[in-house]
Every structure is written in structure tokens, then in C-alpha cells.
Image (spheres, rainbow, N blue to C red):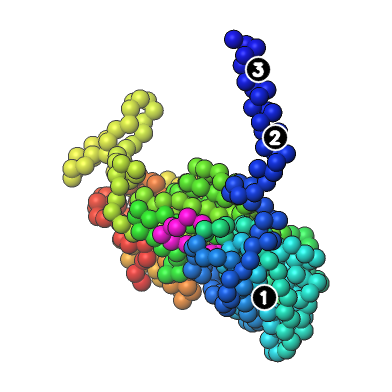
Amino acid sequence: MKPKLNLKKQSIRIAVAIAMAFGLFSCAKKEDKDAQYYQDIKVEGQKEAELTAPPLVPKPVGDRAAMKLIVNMEIKEQEGEMADGVKYTYWTFGGSVPGSFIRTRVGDEVEFHLKNHPDNKMPHNIDLHAVTGPGGGATSSLVAPGHEKVFNFKTINPGLYVYHCATAPVGMHIANGMYGLILVEPEGGLPPVDKEYYVMQGDFYTKGSYGEQGKQPFDMNKAIKEQADYVVFNGKVGAVTGDKAITAKVGETVRIYMGNGGPNLVSSFHVIGEIFDKVHIEGGDVINKNVQTTLIPAGGSAIVEFKVDVPGTFILVDHSIFRAFNKGALGMLKVEGDENKKVYSGTTQEGIYLPEGGTIQNMPKENGTAKSVVAKTVAEQIKSGRELYGRTCFACHQSEGQGVPNAFPPLAKSDFLNANPNRAISAVLHGLSGEITVNGKKFNNVMTSQNLTDEEVADVLTYVYNSWGNNKTVVTPAKVKAIRAKPAPKVTAEH
Ligand SMILES: [Cu+2]
């Protein structure tokens, strides 16, 4: 038996060697197509490329032939808002951060027109990682204000690529927002999906710290030390939250073209409550499946895809998590549609955990039968509420309830809080997101639901209401229970 098998193997090897010698493997098969093959593709026709601002992407290439694409990219230096009340002068490709999305297919011939608006102050250029050639185009594209430079390149490697300005000081040009994505689709295009979005992370360095109001100049020293004040998606805090969230319907497949402009930080990209069915690692050909968090290098990308199975708000974060909750690296995907209790049930049981009893007891559901829970005095409520506050709320709302400007609203002397205890109870029970105004300041952030028992919610809120100049409301567990029984309000809070 054995020698025969070996013989068989040997004859296969010989056949392969002969086939290779005759060049049978050198062309035609898809896997074997390489940069040389794409270099030789003839282009048919020409058109101006569609460019889009984030979070939108141009139409898919589908199965069109390779063609000549004219890209008209205008550089604009313009003032924008980094966060509420925080102004910043961005340098942009096409008027947005990240810059306009460029969509091509492999084998396309791109004629790139880089225009530097006459009102700009600086020279700029462009380095496209999709370009094979010196500087990725930078050496041919340095352009002064009021001028235009043109260069051509052929896309010979499919993938999702970063482009950025590479004019000295390079770090500063990138830090001011000069980056974007160029997609080179494979022959026949990427498989169709229901929703496609463009999101790009970037880190920013300002003279003032996070949230400091007014015009904020770039801070070179912080940039060199890599001490980012802001880490954001799509150029500013809240660019992809609230009514600017990206959306999908239950059952749809979502594809996010995710880039990282840096200049310094690597992103641990994660969507809370979702698992990426597929990830094109680093924007290349290799597809990983069932991924929780994907690493996106500075100057790199990934294509992530997932089907949304249940409704809700899914939070996009850099899982270097202080960046998400304290520096702005937080976005939202809002999914509408029918619940799917098989995939996610919601809370099915609410219990008090008593280790001595050795069981999880159900909270008594009927009125007045809460025998096991002895009613506390207000002073006792405040005492246990203070402890709870220190464990659960303190991290965001701060020790004296003063909050953090532009991130976490104050609980001290909060008009929002004092106006409506039911709303406060609901915020702690169900979480709160969307724009709210507290003491005349706007907040547009996410408070997650706090997963506390009725008694705990009552105690912590009673403590808050009886501290820092608030109106001394006493919140009872019965009241919390009544609010819990009602359906959770929609994500956006009324005010
Ligand atoms: Cu530049």
C-alpha cells in the first residue's frame, strides 16, 4: 500500500512541475492575479469620481470595467467645532474630516487634481497609500494656495487605503485633520450589503484640555508627547451620535469602512453589543470571522461587516475606553425593527441576591407584599445612597456632583434633575442619550443603564437630591418600581 501512495504523490508532483514549466499556472486563475496583471488591464471610458463626506460613501463599482477616473480634490482650511463651544481650525481634504471618500476599482487609472484653495495659508500635498510610487504621490503634488497639481496613478492592489497630507511638519498636517480613505474594490466589486458607512478615528491636541471653551490652537508639545486631548470619530465629539448616528434596520447587513488617521494612536475598534461577522484585516484581502475588537493602526484601516439582529443603540468605541467616555471616541449605530427575544431577552428577572439564603429571590411583584425589605428612614437611604454614588456614579458625575464640562452633566443644582424625578429615575434605570440641556449647557453623550435594584436606585437618587443644593426629593423604592414597570422611553430624552 505505502509505496503505491508515494508513487501517486510523486506523479502529482511531476505533473505540477510540468504544468508550471509550461506556464499553465501563470495566468487566468483569480487567486493568481497580481499587481502585474492589474497593471496591464486596459481602461474603458472615463468619468469624474463621485466624492462623499463621512459617514457616506460613493456608489459601489459593481462589475464595471476598469476606467479612467478624474478626482477633483480641493483642500480647505476652515474653522469647525471640536466639541460644544470648542472651536478648531481644521485643514481638510474636500471640506470634511476625514476627507472625501474616494471609490475606485482595481485597474482604474486615476487622474488626481489637487487644488489648494486661494484663501488657505499653507502649502499641502497628498500621500495616498493606494499609490505605488515615491511618496504615494506626495512628491508630485506639493501645491501652494491658489494652485493646482495633477498626477496620475493606476490602482494595482485592491484594498482600503488611507490618504493623508505629507507636508512638513507632517504630524501637524495630519493632526489638523488631513486624512481620508480611498477604496480600491476588487474585480466585480465587494459583495453587496444593505448599508455602508465611512468612519475614521483621529487624535487631536489642543492648548486647552478637553472641553475648554473657545478657540483652541494646535499644541505641538502635546502632540509630540502623544497626550491627546480629543480622540474622535469623524473629526469632532458627537459627529456620529444622537441624530447624526448611523442607522440600520433589523436583518440588514452593515459594512463600515473604518480608518485611523492618527497621527499617533492605534485604535481598538469595537461596537458594543455586536460581533463583526467579517473583518478585512487591515483593509486587505484576509478575512477574519467572528471578531469582537479589531486593531486599526495609525495610517491603517479595516472593513468590518455584521448583520444586525436586534433593535437598539449600538455604541462604536475605541476600546481603549477612557478615550471613548472621556475624549470623544464614541459613535452610535441606531437599529430599528422587531425584538428578537431568542437572540436577546432583555432583563427577565430582577432579584435580590442574599448569599446566606443561597438563592436569588424574586422581587415581590404585588403591592405591599415587600415583607423582606424593611423600609429605611430618609437618613438611612442617604447613607447607603452615598456609598452607592461613590461606587457607581462618581466616575462620571464627580465627587461633588459637578460633572465634567462637555462630557458628563452636573448633578449639583441640576435644573434637569430637580424638574422631574421620574425622568431621573428613568435615566438611572434605562440609561440616557441624545441631546439634553442642564443648567443652560448642552450635553450629547451616553449614560448607560446602571443595573441597580429599585431600592438602590431610590437610595442613590435620594442621596443626590439631598446633596449639593438640590431640592430634597425623597425617592422611594415603590416609585422606582412603578417607573420600571413602564416601557423604557425612546433613546432621546425630552427636556
Ligand atoms: Cu497639509
The answer to whether the beta carbon of the residue marked 1 is less than 8 Å from any atom of ligand 1 is: no
Q: Which label was assigned to residue 261?
A: none
Tell me whether circle 2 and circle 1 mark residues in contact (CB < 8 Å): no
Tell me which segment is drawn in magenta.
Answer: 190-204
What's the amino acid at mark 2? Answer: Ile
| Residue indicated by mark 3 | 6
| Residue indicated by mark 1 | 111
Q: Secondary structure beneath disc 3?
A: helix
Main SS, magenta region, reads strand
- Residue 198 in the image: x percent, y percent? 53, 64
In this view of the protein, which residue sits in the foreground, 133 or 355?
A: 133
Using the rendered image of the protein, determine whether residue 475 is visible from the camera's viewpoint: yes
In which quadrant of the rendered view does residue 322 lie? bottom right
Tell whether 480 sits left or right of 92. Answer: left
Residue 201 among magenta residues:
yes
Give how far apart the Cα atoms at labels 2 and 1 are. 43 Å
Q: Secondary structure beneath disc 1?
A: strand
